[in-house]
Amino acid sequence: MSLDFSTTLGGAWFPTPIFTASGCASSGKELAQFFPLREIGAVVTKSIMLKPRAGRPTPRMAETPSGMLNSIGLQGPGIDAFLADDVPWLASQGARIVVSIAGETAEEYGVLARKLRGVSGISAIEVNISCPNVENRGLVFACDPNSASEVVKNVRGIIGGELPILAKLTPDVTNIAAIASSVINAGADGIAMINTVLGMVINTETMRPHLGGKTGGLSGPAIRPIAVRAIYQVKQALPNVSILGMGGVASGKDAFELILAGASGVSIGTASFGDPSAVYRIQNELRDILMAKGFTSVKEAVGYAHRSEGE
Amino acid sequence: LPINKNAAQIRATVLSNRRVGVYHQIALEVGDLVRHIKPGNFIAISVGGENSKMVLRRAFAISRTSDRGTVELIISPQGSGSKWLCAQPEGAHVDVVTPLGTAFGIPTEPVTALLVGGGYGSAPLFGLAEVLKNRGCRVIMALGASTAAKIYAPLEGKRAVTLLKIFTEDGTAGETGRVTDSLPDLIAEHDVRVIYSCGPMPMLEALSTIAVQADIAHQCAVEESMACGIGICMTCVMPVKTETGEIKNLRSCIDGPVMDGEAVQWQLVGSQL
C-alpha cells in the first residue's frame, strides 16, 4: 500500500509533513551538510526582525532534565540581509521556505510583511507573536487575544491572499483555543504551536538566575505533553484549521503523536541540537510508522485521536 | 564558504580510555574523518545513551589525531555528560560529529611560537605543536593549572616542544605562580611572533593584553557553553570586533573556537551589546 506523505497547511502544499522549527535551524546552511534540505517538508527560518539584533547576553543556555532553557533574544541579521542572502540560498537548494517574522510592535509586523510581499520562493509566513525572550512580557502578543489579532490583521492586510499565514502561539496562556480563534478570525490561515514555555534556572553556586536574560524558553521532550495537549485543544475547538505542531519531538513516534492530536505538519527543534540529522531521521521514522499503522495519507492521520468511541 | 564543511555524523568506537591525573585520555576510532581534522577543530559527542535525559551534545577539543583514524580527547569529568563519557569502556560506541569549528592558522614563516594552555586546555596544543614543528617553527609551551594533577603534559606530546615551562598556583609542579606572569619576558627573550592558547577565559583575556603589548598575533581557542556545536542554537556567542569595526555576537562553534584574541571583546562577555 502506498502512502501519500504530502501535507497542506493553510492552503500551502508540502511534500512531507516534517519541518525544521524556527530558531532551531538558523537559515538552513548549517544543517545542509547533514541532509538535503529539499527532501524535508520545509525549512522554517529563525524569526527575523526588521533590524539586525545582537540578542541577549550570555549565558544563554541551561540544560534541564529532558530539555533546555534558551535565552537568545532573537539575534539575527535583520530582514534586508536575510532577504538578500538567506532566502535566495535556500531557494537554490530547492527547499520550501517558511519565513518566520517577529516585530517589536504590531506595526512592525506589517512592515516586515511588506518586505516579504512579492519575494519568490516563500511557501508561507510564520508570524511569531510568542517569543518569550523579550524584555517586556506585555510584548508577547500571543498572551492577549486583542494584541494577537491586531498583529495578524496587519500582516494579512499587507499580504492579502498572496501567502498563507501561520500564527505562532505560546502555551503560557489560560485558554490557548481562545487565542487561536482570535488569530484565525483576524485572518490567519493556520496555527503554529507551541513556542517554548517560560522558565528559569537558578545557579546554586552563584545563587542567582543562571541565564543572562534571567528567564528563558523551555524546550525539548520535557514539554511534549504540553504541546500534545495544546494541539488537541485547538483541533477540538477549530477542527478545520491547520496546525503546524512542535514541542519536544525527538522521534517519528513523537511526531506521529502530534499528528494524532491534530497537527498537519510537525517541526523539529531542540532534537536537532543533539542530533544534526534528527529532522531527516524523524521523517523516515514517521513514514514507516504511518505505513505500519495502515494509513494511506498523512491527512488521514491528522487528528485521528479525536475520533469517537467505536470508530 | 560552506558551513560545517567536511563535518560528518558517525558512530565511533572507544579504542582506549585511561586516567591521566584528574583527566581521562580517550581515543576514538573515526576512520577517514581524521584526514579533515586540523588542530583547533572540535568534536561534538552525544552523551547518556538512548532515552537519556541529557538532550544536548557535548563539545570537546581534539588533542591529537593519528593516521590510523583515531582522535584523542582529554576530558575532565566534571558534569554529568563528561562523566558519562569518561565511564565508557573500550569497545563502546559513541555518536560523534566532527570536524567542527575553526582551526589554528599556521604561520607561513618558520617563526618561534608560544603555546599557552590552562588545565586540560593544553590538550589541543600538542597536536598543534607537531604541525608547527613540521613546518619548521620553534615551539615553546607554557602550561599552568592550580595544582600538579591538573597539568596535562604527556611524554609523547613533548617531542615537538623545544622548551616546556610548567606553572602551578600551589607550587606542586614547575614554578609557583600563574602561567601568564612571566610570559612578557619569555616573549622578548625568544623573539616569539605568535601566541596560541586554550584555557579558561581570564587566562585568554590576560594573554590578549600581553600579545597586544608585545605587538604579536594571538590565536585563542575559546570555550563558551554550546547546545549544538553546529551553529544552529546561537547560545555560544562571543562579542567580537569584525573587519568592519562593528562588535557582533559571533558563534564560537562556527566563527570559533579559534578566534583572534585581539578581536574578542573580553570586557563585554556576558554584557548586552
Image: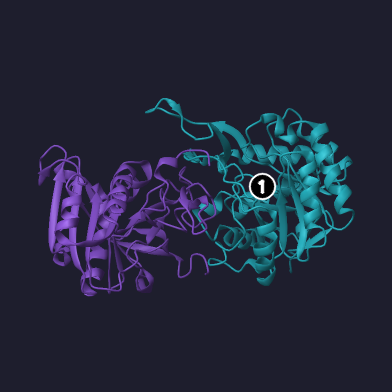
* Secondary structure under the numbered disc 1 in the rendered image: loop
Q: Few, some or many C-alpha atoms within 10 Å of disc 1 (few <14, some 14-19, many ≥20)?
A: many
Residue A167: image quadrant is: top right
Q: Is residue A64 left or right of residue B38?
A: right
Q: Nearer the viewer, residue A252 or A191?
A: A191
Q: Is residue A288 left or right of residue B180?
A: right
Q: Is residue B98 visible?
A: no
Residue type pointed to by label 1: Met
Q: Is residue A116 visible?
A: yes
Chain shaded cyan = A
Q: Residue at x 34, y 47 (%)?
A: B82
Residue B189 image offset from top left, x and y in percent: 14, 58
Q: For the image shown, how many numbered marks are present on the structure? A: 1
Q: Nearer the viewer, residue B209 or A100?
A: B209
Q: Is residue A14 above or below residue B134?
A: above
Residue B193 image offset from top left, x and y in percent: 25, 63
Residue A310: image quadrant is: top right
Q: Is residue B201 above or below residue B103?
A: above
Q: Residue at x 10, y 41 (%)?
A: B172
Residue B127 image offset from top left, x and y in percent: 26, 64
Chain B as rendered: colour: purple
Q: Nearer the viewer, residue A208 or A112?
A: A112
Q: Is residue B76 above or below residue A32?
A: above
Q: Residue at x 81, y 51 (%)?
A: A165
Q: Is residue B124 above or below residue B133?
A: above
Residue of label 1: A246
Residue at the outermost top position: A207
Residue A292 image offset from top left, x and y in percent: 66, 60
Q: Which scheme is used to colour this image of the protein?
A: by chain
Q: Is residue A29 left or right of residue B241?
A: right
Say which chain tag 1 marks: A
